Image (cartoon, rainbow, N blue to C red):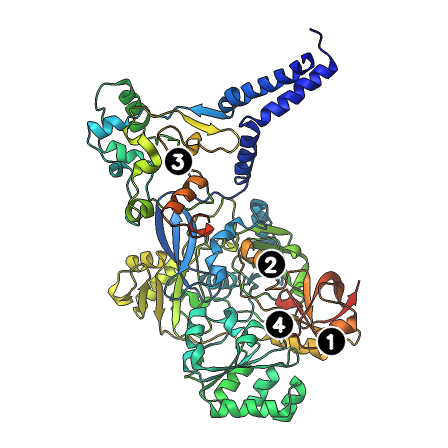
């Protein structure tokens, strides 16, 4: 029995490291460039998702809005918060685009059409992006050190994953499973 | 507690077993797989708002209208407008990324050497420009520059003297012309294809021969005898003897041309013999006519003519500038080499390493479509004059050179556009909105802007055809007269669409053997058997000039006695033998 102690100790160390340490070590995280509140914009400004995350005339999705969209309202500071002052000083005044990190960016080998899902499929933004649209603070962006993908694609509490398995599961449920080339380039 | 080697190994074993019950190893496998989708060097398509630009494809004289989908400044896909694009044109936005692309060269050093050589040459020594895409506005500028320099010489491959109208033909005899494989404007050719019966006379069953109504497998290089039979210079029996066809086949062909008219005879460069044949068939002004050109400024009338290479004294060219930036046909190097002085300076300006680069002291990088600003000569099947700009879709990288810059001349495009506008004839077709506007209703600046936005001018201005050259055909006939019995095969080169193609496309072509790879030849099964080589075998192909190792493709569509090889015109119709390794 005594002879098993080193073996068990090794197993326990590996289990501890694998479950507790590894998930932290595999990701590097950084804050978003601007302390942005979806909640404030939705509640105080009455903005809807598509007001900023719009479709272009040709049906393509504009994604994260560019600075000129923000300066439509924020040409000058709107309020006295530190976040607002930083945004004006660092981005609006010098005309510098914030380098937003996209939580839901899909890999290059995938076609993802927002307009097909939103307009044709009537899928709600929350179905994939969870409660992102009502949060008061943007979470830190966590990037996998090896794959370079966002941690968010695996899904978190209140937000479904955005992996291929998640897509396939939904398409299967909707009886829309056709072929690889529906999504893959 | 004492640490022993056994205890340490047990600890490591326990760690390994324990690790299997954590997400770490499985996640590492997944992440490594995901990482492998993003190898360094994999192109990253640009993301962002798509915008559309219009231009004209300059890869060949068809000059098809192009609608380019661009993300930011980068074109990400090309499509045709009102007629589609060939596979080469569809993938042309890959060309700037070609692995053989020349990215740098001794531009300043070459410019200094050219200036010095021109200034210090002897009184009888020539300065020559070899333009591999004649008929452009750039060609006019070269000719003017050569006219202004003592002993300036303008050299170019032969151009068709006439234009053809396939729409009006009911029977077409093609003497080896790749009629359905990039010879004319693809959209026009295929639009007219159902209206005429095509008879293809060619030594190999090319793509055009395969799609023709009749394929006449003539002996290599003897297609011209059929034109002579049409004009009556030789009788059917002689034509049959020369071509290797039966007298009946030739008789039937001649009867068909007479009875199922209007008939049209074409070859690759519309040589004078073929023009004569068409005149005899009553096609002048109907199925063929003078090749029209867009108006030019009056001052350009002083341009130097296209020089006959045979008449240039041997050893007389001190400076030779070669424009390979939009190469169409090539001239054989051997006759050019004879004309070079002992201390000749040869400068090749080319987008890729190859072509004449190996003969040049200086090889300078050139911009390539879709980076260049150039115009496109009218296609051989265009009976009306045209003026189309290949306006750049992307900026050329820094450090590119041009023969124009070496000579210190302008591109002349704006002057040409103004000259067309001044004449006031013809229409401007703008593909972005699908409209046609009479040129006389436009201001000169608007006309120029529309041309830069992919518009095309078309008119019926006729200028006299001025070049009558058929050295290539003469060279073939001479080489056939001197067949060395030691070399029993005649080399026929695979005709390709002028211009370059995306490396992705050439890979597909070659891996699937749709086009011969550079290291392949094709032989008739009986010839392969005689040489002792099988399909896929390695062999040596030998000519009087040298030999190289190749892989053999056995193909019954090749005429016996012929070796089909990839390559340029300058190796065509030489004698060769194939030796098993």
Image coords of residue A1 (percent x, y): 67, 14
B390 vs B400, nearest the viewer: B390
Residues at discs 2 and 4 both on one chain: yes
Q: Which residue is mark 1?
A: B526
Q: CA distance from mark 2 to mark 4?
A: 16 Å
In front: label 3 or label 4: 3
Q: Residue at x 45, y 41 (%)?
A: A164
Q: Secondary structure at mark 4?
A: helix
Q: Which chain does tag 4 point to?
A: B
Q: CA distance from mark 3 to mark 1?
A: 63 Å
Residue identifier under label 4: B311
* For residue B514, above or below residue B260: above
Q: Are marks 1 and 4 on the same chain?
A: yes
What residue is drawn where x is 69% and y is 6%? B1
Q: Which residue is mark 3?
A: A104
Q: Chain under label 3? A: A
Mark 2 = which residue? B320
Q: Secondary structure at mark 2?
A: strand
Of the two numbered discs 3 and 1 in the rendering, the one whose residue sits closer to the viewer? 3
């Amino acid at each position: 029995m005594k002879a098993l102690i080193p073996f068990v100790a090794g197993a326990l160390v590996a289990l501890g490291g694998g479950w507790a340490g590894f998930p932290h070590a595999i990701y590097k995280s950084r804050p978003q460039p601007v302390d942005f509140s979806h909640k404030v914009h939705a509640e105080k400004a009455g903005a809807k998702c598509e007001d900023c995350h719009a479709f272009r005339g040709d049906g393509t999705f504009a994604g994260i809005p560019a600075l000129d969209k923000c300066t439509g309202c924020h040409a000058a500071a709107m309020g006295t918060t530190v976040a607002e002052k930083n945004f004006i000083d660092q981005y609006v005044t010098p005309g510098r685009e914030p380098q937003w990190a996209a939580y839901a960016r899909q890999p290059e080998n995938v076609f993802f059409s927002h307009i097909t899902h939103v307009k044709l499929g009537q899928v709600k933004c929350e179905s994939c992006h969870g409660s992102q649209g009502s949060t008061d603070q943007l979470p830190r962006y966590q990037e996998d050190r090896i794959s370079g993908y966002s941690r968010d694609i695996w899904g978190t509490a209140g937000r479904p994953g955005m992996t291929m398995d998640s897509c396939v599961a939904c398409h299967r449920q909707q009886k829309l499973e056709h072929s690889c080339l529906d999504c893959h380039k | 507690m004492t640490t022993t080697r056994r205890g340490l190994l047990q600890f490591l074993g326990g760690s390994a077993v324990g690790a299997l019950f954590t997400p770490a190893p499985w996640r590492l496998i997944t992440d490594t797989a995901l990482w492998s989708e993003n190898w360094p060097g994999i192109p990253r398509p640009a993301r962002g708002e798509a915008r559309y630009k219009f231009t004209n494809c300059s890869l060949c004289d068809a000059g098809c209208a192009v609608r380019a989908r661009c993300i930011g400044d980068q074109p990400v896909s090309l499509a045709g407008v009102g007629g589609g694009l060939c596979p080469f044109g569809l993938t042309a936005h890959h060309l700037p990324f070609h692995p053989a692309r020349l990215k740098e060269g001794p531009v300043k050093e070459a410019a200094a050497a050219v200036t010095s050589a021109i200034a210090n040459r002897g009184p009888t020594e020539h300065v020559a420009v070899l333009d591999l895409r004649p008929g452009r506005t750039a060609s006019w500028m070269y000719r003017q520059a050569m006219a202004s320099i003592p002993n300036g010489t303008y050299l170019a491959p032969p151009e068709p003297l006439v234009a053809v109208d396939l729409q009006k033909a009911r029977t077409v005899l093609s003497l080896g012309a790749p009629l359905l494989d990039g010879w004319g404007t693809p959209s026009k050719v295929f639009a007219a294809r159902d209206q005429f019966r095509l008879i293809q006379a060619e030594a190999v069953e090319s793509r055009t021969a395969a799609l023709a109504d009749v394929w006449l497998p003539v002996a290599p290089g003897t297609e011209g005898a059929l034109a002579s039979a049409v004009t009556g210079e030789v009788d059917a029996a002689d034509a049959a003897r020369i071509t290797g066809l039966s007298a009946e086949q030739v008789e039937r062909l001649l009867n068909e041309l007479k009875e199922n008219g209007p008939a049209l005879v074409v070859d690759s460069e519309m040589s004078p013999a073929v023009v004569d044949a068409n005149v005899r068939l009553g096609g002048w002004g109907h199925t063929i006519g003078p090749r029209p050109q867009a108006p030019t400024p009056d001052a350009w009338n002083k341009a130097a003519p296209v020089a006959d290479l045979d008449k240039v004294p041997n050893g007389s060219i001190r400076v030779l500038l070669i424009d390979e930036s939009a190469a169409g046909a090539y001239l054989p190097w051997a006759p050019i080499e004879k004309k070079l002085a002992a201390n000749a300076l040869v400068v090749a300006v080319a987008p890729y390493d190859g072509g004449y680069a190996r003969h040049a002291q200086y090889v300078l990088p050139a911009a390539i479509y879709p980076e260049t600003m150039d115009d496109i000569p009218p296609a051989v099947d265009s009976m009306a004059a045209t003026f189309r700009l290949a306006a750049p879709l992307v900026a050329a990288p820094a450090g590119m050179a041009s023969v124009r810059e070496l000579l210190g001349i302008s591109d002349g495009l704006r002057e040409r556009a103004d000259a067309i506008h001044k004449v006031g004839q013809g229409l401007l077709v703008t593909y972005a909105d699908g409209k046609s506007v009479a040129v006389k209703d436009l201001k000169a600046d608007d006309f120029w802007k529309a041309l830069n936005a992919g518009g095309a001018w078309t008119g019926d201005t006729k200028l006299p055809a001025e070049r009558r050259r058929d050295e290539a055909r003469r060279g073939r006939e001479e080489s056939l007269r001197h067949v060395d019995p030691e070399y029993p095969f005649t080399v026929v080169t695979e005709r390709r669409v002028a211009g370059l193609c995306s490396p992705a496309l050439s890979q597909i072509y070659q891996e699937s053997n749709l086009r011969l790879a550079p290291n392949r030849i094709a032989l008739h099964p009986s010839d392969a058997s005689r040489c002792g080589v099988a399909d896929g075998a390695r062999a040596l192909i030998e000519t009087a000039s040298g030999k190289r190792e190749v892989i053999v493709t056995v193909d019954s569509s090749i005429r016996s006695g012929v070796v089909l090889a990839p390559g340029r015109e300058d190796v065509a119709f030489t004698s060769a033998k194939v030796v098993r390794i």
